[in-house]
Image (cartoon, rainbow, N blue to C red):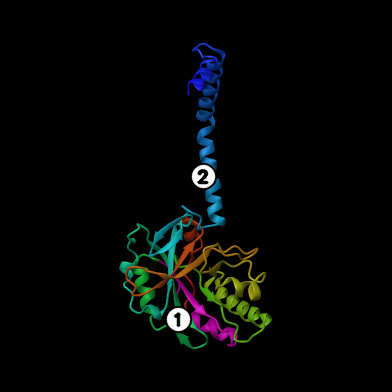
């Protein structure tokens, strides 16, 4: 120990006014100035970079919040559900209330019809009460490629009256019924054409990534896409970017017994309003 102490004693002393002290003060001063001038910008851009990363990888550590009993990417802030008679009797006033996490449901897609003749037995009640609760509503039709597309469109039109502020009609297309891609696309286009002629707005397409890539990719690029994808990573749909993401079927929402599908909207509340119907639709005779 004595030898090490002796070696240390031979090191040059750094006096207050030495060249070492001056350099240290210069570096400290420059660092301080750099922090003042560029610090806020670096902080902001690092935040933007992180937000961009969470859009690509929504479930990065720190990018997830817990709401409605499930993990949700923090980057999305507009939440919705979709329901049918399977959810039983729904208390829509409670659905519209805030979750314990402080988040709330903003929109709902409600099953209206299926095939040529079927109607969801809870549609009219759900449609009315969801509107009264202040939720943005949308109605969907479960499409069967094996049935006449015109008759299916007529089934939807007879049962769904849309008003300004409602979301566009939805074509739920996820089964093939042993039809070819050409037949599927032909039927879906016919349904969409008739629906657009009646309601004055292009329908939203609901499907899953696999069905989309095999049967629909490149065919409906002028439509809004609602994608079902129960995995942490963001769904990929090629050139057509999705607007709605059905993330899970295991959400818990007040007013609904059991689990329900939870969706996020990729935009803001104002942009959600912009895709809603603006004018009253022609009602069937």
Q: Determine which quarter of the picture holds residue 19.
A: top right
Badge 2 or badge 1: first in the primary sequence: 2
Report the side of 127 relative to 193 (left or right): left
Residue at (47% x, 60% y) in the render: 273
Question: Against 232, is 181 above or below?
Answer: below
In this rendering, is residue 64 above or below 13?
below
- x, y percentage for residue 176? 60, 83
Segment colored magenta: 136-163
Residue sitting at x 32%, y 63%: 97
Outermost residue toward the top in this view: 17
Is 241 contained in the magenta span? no
Instruction: Find residue 47 and name its label.
Output: 2
Cα separation between marks 2 and 1: 48 Å
Quarter of the view holding residue 65: bottom left
**Disc 1 secondary structure class:** helix
* Residue 159 falls inside the magenta stretch: yes
The x and y percentages for residue 86 are 40, 80
Query: Residue beneath label 1, please?
Result: 159
User: How many C-alpha atoms fall within 10 Å of the one at disc 1: few (<14), some, or many (≥20)?
Assistant: some
Residue found 49% across the figure and 80% down from its top: 156
* Residue 91: percent from left, percent from top: 31, 72
Q: Estimate how packed mark 2 is, as few (under 14), some (14 to 19) or many (20 or more) residues with alpha carbons within 10 Å.
A: few
Q: Image check: 131 left or right of 280?
A: left
């Amino acid at each position: 120990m004595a030898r090490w102490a002796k070696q240390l004693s031979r090191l040059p002393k750094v006096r207050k006014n030495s060249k070492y002290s001056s350099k240290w003060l210069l570096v400290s001063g420059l660092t301080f100035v750099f922090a003042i001038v560029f610090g806020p910008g670096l902080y902001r851009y690092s935040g933007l970079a992180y937000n961009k990363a969470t859009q690509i990888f929504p479930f990065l550590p720190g990018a997830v919040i817990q709401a409605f009993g499930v993990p949700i990417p923090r980057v999305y802030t507009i939440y919705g559900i979709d329901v049918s008679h399977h959810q039983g009797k729904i208390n829509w006033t409670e659905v519209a209330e805030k979750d314990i996490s402080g988040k709330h449901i903003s929109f709902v897609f409600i099953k209206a019809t299926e095939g040529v003749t079927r109607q969801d037995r809870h549609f009219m009640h759900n449609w009315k009460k969801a509107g009264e609760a202040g939720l943005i509503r949308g109605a969907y039709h479960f499409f069967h490629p094996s049935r006449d597309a015109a008759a299916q469109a007529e089934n939807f039109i007879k049962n769904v009256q849309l008003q300004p502020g409602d979301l566009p009609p939805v074509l739920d297309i996820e089964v093939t019924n042993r039809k070819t891609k050409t037949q599927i696309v032909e039927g879906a286009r016919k349904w969409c054409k008739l629906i657009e002629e009646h309601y004055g707005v292009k329908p939203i397409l609901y499907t899953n990534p696999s069905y989309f890539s095999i049967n629909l990719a490149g065919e409906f690029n002028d439509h809004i896409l609602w994608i079902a994808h129960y995995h942490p990573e963001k769904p990929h749909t090629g050139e057509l970017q999705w607007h709605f993401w059905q993330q899970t079927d295991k959400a818990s929402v007040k007013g609904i017994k059991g689990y329900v599908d939870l969706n996020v909207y990729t935009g803001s509340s104002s942009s959600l309003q912009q895709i809603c119907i603006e004018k009253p639709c022609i009602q069937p005779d």
